[in-house]
Image (cartoon, rainbow, N blue to C red):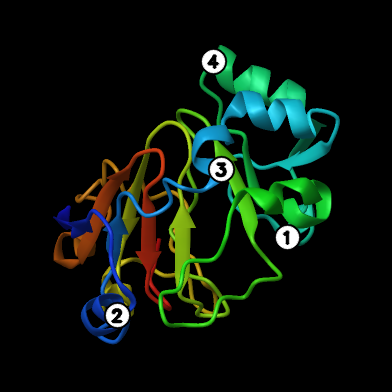
Amino acid sequence: MNLTEINRVKTIGKEDFLTNYFKPQKPVVIEKLIGDWPAFSKWSLDHMKEVAGDKTVPLYDDRPVDYKDGFNEPHAQMKMSEYVDLLKKEPTKYRIFLWNLLKEVPELQNDFKYPDFGIRFLKGLPMLFFGGKDSHTFMHYDIDLANIFHFHFEGQKQCILFDQKQSKYLYKIPYSLITREDIDFCKPDYKKWPALQKAKGFFTNLEHGNILYIPEGYWH
């Protein structure tokens, strides 16, 4: 696809972020801003198993959305300890989506703080996402059009973004926030989905400790 690598900086100040990324609504990867967080050294699969192993977590796979499944109903559930063991054992499409860490494991809130980027954070709703090799989310944008700061821990993750100007090329499902769920944005079939060749987007590969800023309304 026609993807440009997202700009990366080692660290960033408030004015620099506001001027060069927030105001023009451009994504950026900040590589080394959270090295002093306890989470930077502590947050791993093993640590999550230790502090939350007895919690039952909702799991989702890549099956298409079906009204029969109910709104946001999980496709499976298991103990966090079992899920961590599964992630370590083999590739799985099961992922944890929008897990409220402050509600389920309150002590984890002591491991991080909110960087001062010059904008207000929605402090009450920090969420955890988990996924193993082969798991992915459908291309979507968030209904609240929030500016997203995605803090990545353990392993690698590839992220693909598009701004709203590209919507006409992405095969958006009418009256929804998602694209066609049978499109593989990692290996797109241009014979089946020719308009994708016109879409201009961004990509990056996140490492432990990286922060990805996703501007409001971006497809991801």
Query: Callout 4 environment at 10 Å: few (<14), some (14 to 19), or many (20+)?
Result: few
Identify the residue under disc 4: 90
Q: Are marks 2 and 3 in contact (CB under 8 Å)?
A: no
Disc 2: CA contacts within 10 A as few (<14), some (14-19) or many (>=20): some
Checking the image for residue 201, the label placed there is none
Residue 2: give x, y in percent of width and height.
14, 57
Q: How far across and down, in percent of the image, does residue 132 sit?
A: 52, 30
Q: Circle 4 — which element? A: loop
* Numbered disc in front, either 2 or 1: 2
**Distance (Cα) linking label 3 and label 1:** 38 Å
- Label 4 or label 2, whichever comes before in sequence order: 2
Q: Is residue 22 above or below residue 187?
A: below
Amino acid type, callout 4 = Glu
Q: Name above or below for residue 207 compared with residue 16.
A: above
Read off the residue under disc 2. Answer: 25
Q: Residue furthest top?
A: 89
Disc 1 element? helix
Viewer-nearest of labels 4 and 2?
Answer: 2
Q: Residue 124 appears in which quarter of the rendering? A: bottom right
Foreground label between 4 and 1:
4
Tell me, yes or no, whether the two marked residues, 4 and 2, touch with CB atoms within 8 Å.
Answer: no
